[in-house]
Image (cartoon, rainbow, N blue to C red):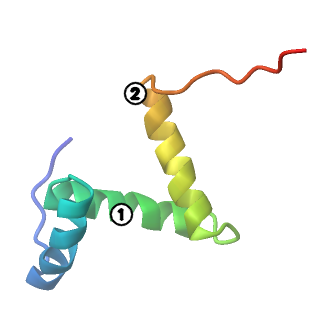
Amino acid sequence: MAATLKLSDELIYLAAPYAVAAHRSVSQQIEYWARLGKAAEDNPELPIEFIKNTLLAVAESDAKLHTDYSIRN
């Protein structure tokens, strides 16, 4: 469900260079920050890098970009 939100010009200004670097739109960047912030609040004991890597792993799995791990004898 999409919704129209009023965001400060400052937030949009701050998100713009991060969006360009990550090849996202500004709204996608702000959405990413929101997901990251929610995950950090839900898991305050976890380092932010771990949370970022976990979100990336989930996105890769959703996009079928993962490979199964197997141990060969």
Query: Which quadrant: the C terminus?
Result: top right
- The N terminus, quarter of image: top left
> Looking at the image, which residue is at 8% across and 81% down?
9
Closest to the camera, between mark 1 and mark 2, is 2
> What is the residue that sits farthest to the top in this orientation?
73
Out of 53 and 10, give the one closest to the viewer: 53
Q: Secondary structure at mark 1?
A: helix
Q: Amino acid at mark 1?
A: Ala
Name the image quarter holding residue 64.
Answer: top left
Q: Nearer the viewer, residue 49 or 43?
A: 49
- Which residue, given by chain and number where applicable, does mark 1 sit on? 34
Give the percent coordinates (x, y) of residue 27: 17, 58
- Judge whether 13 appears above or below 71 on screen: below
Q: Residues within 10 Å of mark 2 (few under 14, many from 20)?
A: few
Instruction: Locate residue 26, reporting x and y percent.
Output: 15, 61
**CA gap, disc 1 and disc 2:** 21 Å
Which residue is located at x 55 percent, y 53 percent? 53
**N-terminal-most mark, 1 or 2:** 1
Q: Residue lying at the far front in this picture: please name it.
A: 73
Q: Are marks 1 and 2 in contact (CB under 8 Å)?
A: no
| Amino acid type, mark 2 | Ala
Mark 2 highlights which residue?
63
Q: How many badges with numbers are in the image?
A: 2
Find residue 23 and report its horizontal and vertical position in percent.
21, 52
